[in-house]
Image (cartoon, helix red, strand yellow):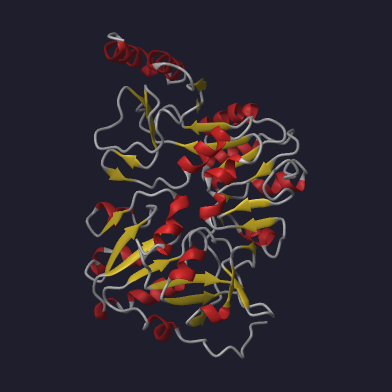
Amino acid sequence: MMNKKLPNYHTAEDALSIIKSGDRVFVQGSAATPQFLIRKLTERASELRDVEIVSITTYGDFPLSEEKYKDSFFINSLFVSANVREAVNGGRGDYVPVFLSEIPHLFRSDILPIDVAIVHVSPPDKHGFCSLGVSVDVAREAVLSAKHVIAQVNPQMPRTHGDGLIQASRFDVLVEVNEPLPEVDYSLRMSSKEQTIGRYIAEMIDDGATLQMGIGGIPDAVLSCLTNHKGLGIHTEMFSNGVMPLIKSGVITNEHKYRHPGRIATGFIVGNRQLYDFVDDNPLILMQRTDYVNDVRIISSNPKVTAINSAIEIDLTGQVVSDTIGTLQYSGIGGQMDFIRGAALSKGGKPIIALPSVTNKGISRITPFINQGAAVTTTRAHVHYVVTEFGVAYLYGKNLRQRAQALINIAHPDHRDHLEEEALKRFRHL
């Protein structure tokens, strides 16, 4: 039961009146995207100008990014999600290249000071604490450093353990809502290529390993192939539905982890309602801020860290492009480099980049050169394993010619001759 004695419940209109023209406003992301307050904020568009909206990945509709509101709101994204991609690439926004682990520092150090933070929380408990629920990540530091904080309070938000517990008194105003969180299930869209990649990666994972997985079909494909493994642990920036069967079957026990043995450490969660119900008040799940969970030193202290991350393209030297398509800013750097490096430094660790060999249009993702205008997300010096549906390439310690040949061997057969020709031209002087 929500504590009705708290004096600071307001209407959305009253709560959002805190926001002034020229303010920088943080909006919580992931499945905790405060969609009700976002919709209500658009109603103030005519009276606001140059309000900067800062966020990582957001889910659901994001009307603040629409063309008609371009004079009112500017999207300054820390990780470009599908609902703001057009705005960021169309002049109504921009992107800040930054490691996920360092975003809290931007807020804390006033490099990116926050005027107002809008967050989505569980109702206060009997001690007056709300939970940031399924998205602690960078949201905790935004709450602690913002001049003003508006909280959307929702009984459908899970109460999670860890760093996300915030006293309700920290919020300037609370707005009551009761609506479902966004839901996703990437396993429903899993392709046969992703399933094959998942099997290859599963064969590389040792019993007792600590796993980090990104989002999408490949991570879920990997998890579905781990039913015969033992003693796995999770230390990851995020996880989705695929971990639940492995927890219930005893495959994921977290018993071998150095950091938080017996518990899953994560920054945010995205999945279906069953997952949100599973994490609700579950002490197994430890929600943490990204400057901790994505800290390379923390990651690498765990045993056999196996980091699984995706890519858009990779050139013949091993340069990985994961967040741009040419000059188009598609997503963001996120935590890939944090975990690729953390896994490399872990005893027995395996940093893995996984990608289908071709795009949906049949264009090779293994390329002689990265596309003009594209940005390198993970450098060739950081890459160890690359996996496609045609196998595994191990690049660490290999010279440029050896790397090129290893990557050509896992490229789509239709493109191997061309890649061989380009490699010969590029490396014949070596």
Which is nearer the eye, 297 or 404?
Answer: 297
Who's the residue at 44% across and 61% down the image?
Answer: 60
Q: Give the quarter of the figure containing the N terminus.
A: bottom right
Which x, y percent locates residue 429? 27, 9
Q: Indicate whether 364 appears above or below 161.
A: above
419 relative position to 72: left or right: right
Residue 154, position in %: x, y?
57, 74
Q: Is residue 24 above or below residue 126?
A: above
In the image, is residue 265 above or below residue 403?
below
Which quadrant is the C terminus positioned in? top left
Task: Residue at 43%, 63% (x, y): give it.
Answer: 108
Quadrant assignment, res 73: bottom left
Q: Is residue 183 above or below residue 349?
A: below
- Report if residue 227 is visible in the image: yes
Asked if residue 34 can be seen in this view, the reply is no
Residue at the (48%, 83%) spot, across then down: 173
Q: Nearer the viewer, residue 38 or 293?
A: 293
- On the image, the x and y values in percent for residue 99 come to 42, 48
Please state if 145 lies on the left or on the right of 20 as rendered.
Answer: right
